[in-house]
Amino acid sequence: MAEYDPKSLKAEEFINDEEILETLKYAEENKNNTELINKILEKARPQKTATGCVCAGLTHREASVLLACDDPDVIKKIYDIAEEIKLAFYGNRIVIFAPLYLSNYCVNGCVYCPYHMKNKHIARKKLTQEEVKAEVIALQDMGHKRLAIEAGEDPVNNPIEYILDCIKTIYSVHHKNGDIRRVNVNIAATTVENYRKLKEAGIGTYILFQETYHKESYLKLHPTGPKHDYAYHTEAMDRAMEGGIDDVGLGVLFGLELYKYEFAGLIMHAEHLEAVHGVGPHTISVPRVKHADDIDPDAFDNSIDDETFAKITACIRLAVPYTGMIISTRENEQVRSKLLKLGISQVSGGSRTSVGGYTEEERPHDTEQFDVSDQRTLDEVVKWLMESGHIPSFCTACYREGRTGDRFMSLCKNGQILNCCHPNALMTLSEYLEDYASEETKKTGYALIEKELERIPKEKVREIARKNIEAIKNSDRRDFRF
């Protein structure tokens, strides 16, 4: 029997089944322990310092106790603290991105994904470099600056060389005032050598969803293909960091396994990265199983309702306070709106989850990985965010200024990142308003910018930001950043 060790590089030791089961038992036994719960809540709360705020975060056991508690008063406190943490470190900024599907060829047999190899009626498609360029131009015409590229696992159709060529193509496209300034990569677990190649190609975050941390379920859900190897998949982030990628993104697909088990495993993975590499996950995503081509979410009996989903999101924010949290268009407007207050700091907008979908006038469904619940345009999403008091941010400055990994986290942890992020968000929003927004969105946006400029504490920074925004409005000058 493997022993739990967060510093181990072996999957079954840093994600230890026995430790998770003991954690769930401990959480159940203490879910009504008022004294303990109050101590955990107090530990999670942001503490003000001379330079900003600090947060202790929570261990997987502490966070699991909060998740198990069903007292409405405690849940309200969890939600309030989650919002407090989110505002302390990310302010009211929400980063905007879009997925770009390159290929749906896949050799795996994942039973929850329509790209699985046995699905013979789905249209298989792989973008040529010219088609990649056309998709990027369509995304730039919407106003996007940040993409997350997606591809099935297929060593023949989607080798690492193909992925690298696509990244090179994406960065090469300069259309009108448009540029994709950051490419995040969501592809299958690979080798240290290939992660080095991705790093050299200038990627942002490497994202890989665990899907489930429950090994027995994992093996059943991935019956065939290279993804069947639980250890190789689970240890991928360590190889990515060994390959020089210092920003990695975690996530599970909620609904495949019991959510309390998945939650504990997810927090343990974050603890492992911190223990071994000195920096936790840059992002954590919270997708749920959704309908797709030949996938019925009702076939999975571990689905979670909206309230439980909200509670999971808030508890992740308390446990891993500095991580970016992502919600995609899998979720509808109402769910996304609620989760924005509970810790979410990144959303996708105007997304199409089919290969080649952005160049089609009508949303194609024949190659979609999952149904899109929030089908609003990017302009509608931007306007919605602003009307709900958020700043839509297209900023990618930290990556291009070398503020990644432990450098980003150290700035975030002492609150100094706010001196860069707030003005950068306003300047990139101004770019969007000038180049892509509808008149109504533009009017709403500049009223918001004027109000938010006054919130920049340093007068010099405020004046530089104001000057740069005027330059954006009155010329073709773009890409100002702190």
Image: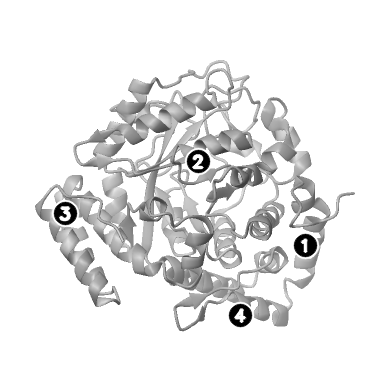
Q: Amino acid at mark 4?
A: Glu
Measure how far apart labels 1 and 4 are at the Cα level. Answer: 20 Å
Check disc 1 and report its element: helix, strand or loop. Answer: helix
Q: Which mark is residue 42?
A: 4
The C terminus: image quadrant: bottom left
Label 2: which residue? 199
**Residue 78 visible in the displayed image:** yes
Tell me which label, 2 or 1, sits earlier in the chain.
1
**Residue 185 visible in the displayed image:** no
Task: Classify mark 2: residues with Cα within 10 Å, few (<14), some (14-19) or many (20+).
Answer: some
Measure how far apart labels 3 and 2 are at the Cα level. Answer: 31 Å
Front residue of 284/254: it is 284
Task: Classify mark 1: residues with Cα within 10 Å, few (<14), some (14-19) or many (20+).
Answer: many
Relative placement, left or right, of 162 versus 147 is: right
Tell me which label, 3 or 2, sits earlier in the chain.
2
Tell me which label, 1 or 3, sits earlier in the chain.
1
Label 3: which residue? 472
Judged by depth in the image, the label closer to the viewer, 4 or 2, is: 2
Check disc 4 and report its element: helix, strand or loop. Answer: helix
What residue is drawn where x is 56% and y is 77%? 45
Residue 445 location, x and y as percent?
A: 21, 59
Check disc 3 and report its element: helix, strand or loop. Answer: helix
Measure how far apart labels 4 and 2 are at the Cα level. Answer: 39 Å
Label 1: which residue? 23
What residue is drawn where x is 69% and y is 43%? 235
